[in-house]
Image (cartoon, rainbow, N blue to C red):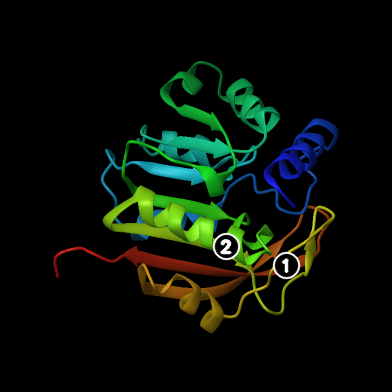
């Protein structure tokens, strides 16, 4: 699926679905918040939410005092939903509608957060583009947080096939650019009551002073 096809697909999802009922919905993204808190990032940290959809993560990060939070998603509709939900607070944030595999910024980020986007990339060139993108945009010593379906999780989501990952596969994938901090699995309960097994990886970009 190329960028144009991906954009068409996700614009349709966010325009036609009640996203409080889709499988990935979280009113409180507890795992992501717990990871970011564990990283002990300063309130001035640049935390990018890549492939954010209309996630509630920025709402909670704002409440915790973070304000340098770029939100990137291929769907303009998803970003518009966040803007409408946050109202005046949305002015504190930066929004960019683009494919994360093509994202580029003049800033270097302290933390790149991606929950359930990376596993939609099935082709080797898309995966490589993603690896080069995160390496290019995260500062040396900065963190990459990735959540995917585990190797016992679903093999489809939102009508698309996903790439499942084992702990070993995830670590190997990011090892050219990142050192592993932690990898763990966790069950996510969907709004309909189903269970999805996620694998979360926390990585630190190489190139920092030890």
- Left or right of 1 in this view: 30: left
Q: Which residue is mark 2?
A: 127
**SS at mark 1?**
strand
Q: In the structure shown, which secondary structural element does the residue marked by tag 2 occupy? A: helix
Quadrant assignment, res 20 = top right
- Residue visible at 57% across and 62% down in the picture: 127
Query: In terms of sequence position, does the residue under pointer 2 or pointer 1 come before the other?
Result: 2
* Residue 169 appears in the picture as rendered: yes
* x and y, in percent, of residue 205 in the image: 32, 63
Q: Do the numbered discs 2 and 1 sit on residues whose CB atoms are within 8 Å?
A: no
> From what the image shows, is residue 65 above or below residue 159?
above
Q: How many marks?
A: 2
Q: Determine the residue positioned at 44% across, 27% down.
A: 93
Residue 80 vs 72, above or below: the answer is above
Please name which of the two marks, 2 or 1, marks the residue nearer to the observer.
2
Q: How many residues crowd around disc 1 within 10 Å: few (fewer than 14), some, or many (20 or more)?
A: some
Local crowd size for mark 2, using a 10 Å CA cut-off: few (<14), some (14–19), many (≥20) = some
The answer to whether 90 is drawn above or below residue 188 in the figure is: above
User: Is residue 20 among what the camera can see?
Assistant: no
The numbered dot on residue 66 is none
Whole-percent x and y of residue 179?
34, 73
Q: Nearer the viewer, residue 204 or 189?
A: 204
Q: Residue at x 44, y 57 (%)?
A: 132
The numbered dot on residue 196 is 1
- 29 or 173: nearer the eye? 173
Quadrant assignment, res 153: bottom right
Q: At x 49% / y 42%, what residue is drawn?
A: 103
Left/right placement of residue 19 relative to residue 43 reads right
User: Where is the C terminus found, in terms of image quarters?
Assistant: bottom left
Between 172 and 129, the one nearer to me in the picture? 129
Residue 64's spot in the image, x, y percent? 39, 39
- Left or right: where does residue 208 sit relative to residue 20? left
């Amino acid at each position: 699926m190329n960028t144009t096809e991906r954009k068409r697909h996700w614009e349709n999802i966010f325009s036609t679905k009640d996203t409080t009922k889709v499988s990935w919905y979280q009113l409180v993204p507890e795992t992501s918040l717990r990871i970011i808190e564990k990283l002990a990032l300063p309130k001035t940290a640049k935390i990018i939410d890549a492939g954010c959809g209309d996630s509630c993560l920025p709402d909670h990060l704002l409440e915790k005092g973070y304000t340098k939070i770029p939100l990137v998603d291929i769907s303009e509709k998803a970003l518009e939903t966040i803007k409408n939900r946050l109202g005046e607070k949305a002015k504190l944030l930066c929004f960019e509608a683009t494919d994360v595999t093509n994202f580029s910024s003049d800033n270097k980020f302290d933390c790149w957060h991606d929950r359930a986007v990376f596993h939609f990339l099935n082709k080797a060139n898309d995966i490589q583009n993603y690896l080069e993108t995160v390496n290019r945009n995260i500062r040396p010593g900065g963190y990459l947080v990735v959540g995917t379906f585990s190797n016992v999780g679903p093999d489809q989501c939102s009508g698309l096939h996903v790439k499942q990952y084992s702990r070993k596969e995830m670590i190997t994938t990011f090892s050219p650019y990142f050192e592993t901090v932690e990898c763990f699995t966790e069950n996510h309960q969907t709004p309909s009551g189903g269970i999805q097994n996620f694998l979360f990886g926390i990585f630190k970009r190489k190139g920092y002073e030890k």
